[in-house]
Image (cartoon, rainbow, N blue to C red):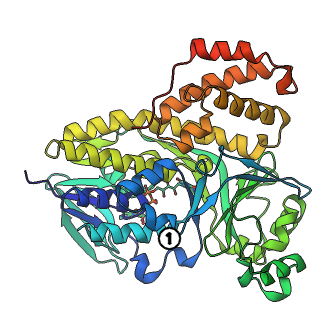
Amino acid sequence: MQKPAITIIGAGLVGSLLATLLAQRGFPITVLERRPDPRKFGFLGGRSINLALAERGWHGLRVAGMQERMRSIAVMMRGRMVHDLNGRTNLQRYGRDDSEVIWSVSRGALNMALLDAAEAAGATVHFDRGLVSVDWACMDLQFRDSDGTEHSHHAGIVIGADGAGSALRGAMAAQQELGERFEPLGHGYKELEIPALADFPREQLPAELADALARGERYAIEPHALHIWPRGNYMCIALPNAEGSFTVTLFLPNEGEPSLQTVVSAKQAREFFQRDFADTVPLIPELEKDFVGNPTGLLGTLYLDRWHYEGRALLVGDASHAIVPFHGQGMNSGFEDAVELADLLESRPNDCAAVFAEFERRRKPNADAIAAMALENYVEMRDRVDDADYLLMRELDRLLADRHPGRWVPRYWMVTFSRIPYLTAFERGALQSSWLREWIDGVSSIDQLDLPAIDMQIRNKLDFLPTDA
Ligand code: FAD
């Protein structure tokens, strides 16, 4: 049976993976992307921006046949390296061993690899085409290029993978109430860079790093970790890049003290870093330039009651459920969308209305769950990772995971190392966390706990979790 032609708006991470998966399944695919082709014109002005890729994201890449290509340029992160105010560090492993880790990948390299894959699978990608409006009566889409010239494209079915500010969402909302709600976090972010040792200005290279460079090392700090400088209401994180640099992200409230209103100038940025992140200062030689020159990013959560319109249009990825980045799951959940949608469309290629409704029914509760967990994780990362109660809860959580495999699984593991539905992780995680809090109440070490009683409660009250599909 002939498969319907599908138009995808946006060739970002989710749009290009979806284009690949659908083209591989024989759908005629056209993708229209607002930006120029990053393979010819570079990505984001050449800045190194990276993302944490976890099991759900790897699964999408595996289904598309891209795992090996990306694994070769991904950097393993075994845990959180927590930096305290005095510059002391402590590695908190994410999982039990190197099979339970997350990976840092370059956003640009991943996007370009996915574009190659989409085209290799037969998709046609047009760049420099920003969607402006949709004439729903005749399904004509209007685009504008960077010269201001208008182009039109006729579509049978259109899928919006055009990110948090989706133009397709705007066009759908003009036809039908989508129940859109954006909740700003009240915090924003700035990206800075720790260069690869070889790229440090020689006169600014601290002596111990000069020695490391002489020994052939490439990284200024431990490469196989996600670094966190938790400071209560704000924090810095740093993820490694394959070539030896780190992308540092400062998350700071929009208002108050300190905030993006009080740390503005180059001088204020240096003073703030010297006070709160002193060990990073010698590592960021262009601190002032990065801070003042790089844009300030906004953060928030997007909720929609409805993701589709009449079997003709559907939203995926950030276009329907943008979340805050503190669980590192925005792209990962968007990749799950892409796999689920490709499977549904393949099973019923000529009933898009049913497929879109089913997609929303399956994905939306999970999108809501990861949105909530991502918000909770911000508080955990910036405020709790060095707190004694938190560390005790974490120790018990992991001990119980060893004693009850498949039945007691720490929430972070469910979200990150498995494809257990986010909603299950959220609900089971809330229950486990309430029990953990109860058990450690008034206790200062694991030895003081009645472990046989705890084991009994778990065996009697918790079912085994679903294994991955
Ligand atoms: P986008 O990546 O935004 O892509 C949308 C595409 O559509 C772009 O190419 C854009 O140019 C194009 N477009 C936009 N408008 C139009 C238009 N009108 N016409 C045509 N094309 C258009 N997620 C993780 O999984 N792990 C992480 O570690 C992680 N870290 C993050 C850190 C930060 C600071 C932020 C802000 C986000 C992070 N995320 C992370 C989330 C992740 O970046 C997003 O979830 C992901 O990029 C969503 O992909 P997308 O394709 O849906 O949208």
Name the residue: 85% across, 24% down.
447
Q: Nearer the viewer, residue 276 or 108?
A: 108
Q: Looking at this rendering, what residue extends furthest in the right direction?
A: 86
Vertical placement of residue 128 versus 31, above or below: below
Q: Position of residue 164 (x, y in %)?
A: 46, 53
- Residue 174 visible from this viewpoint: no
- Residue 80 visible from this viewpoint: yes
> Picture quarter containing residue 252?
bottom right
Name the residue: 28% across, 35% down.
358
Vertical placement of residue 453 versus 468, above or below: above
Tell me the kind of residue under disc 1.
Gly
Is residue 410 rendered to the left or right of residue 121? Answer: right
Q: Position of residue 96 (x, y in %)?
A: 66, 43
Residue under label 1: 108
> Picture quarter containing residue 25?
bottom left
Q: Position of residue 170 (x, y in %)?
A: 36, 51
Q: Secondary structure at mark 1?
A: helix
Vertical placement of residue 115 versus 431, above or below: below
Q: Looking at this rendering, what residue extends furthest in the bottom direction?
A: 202
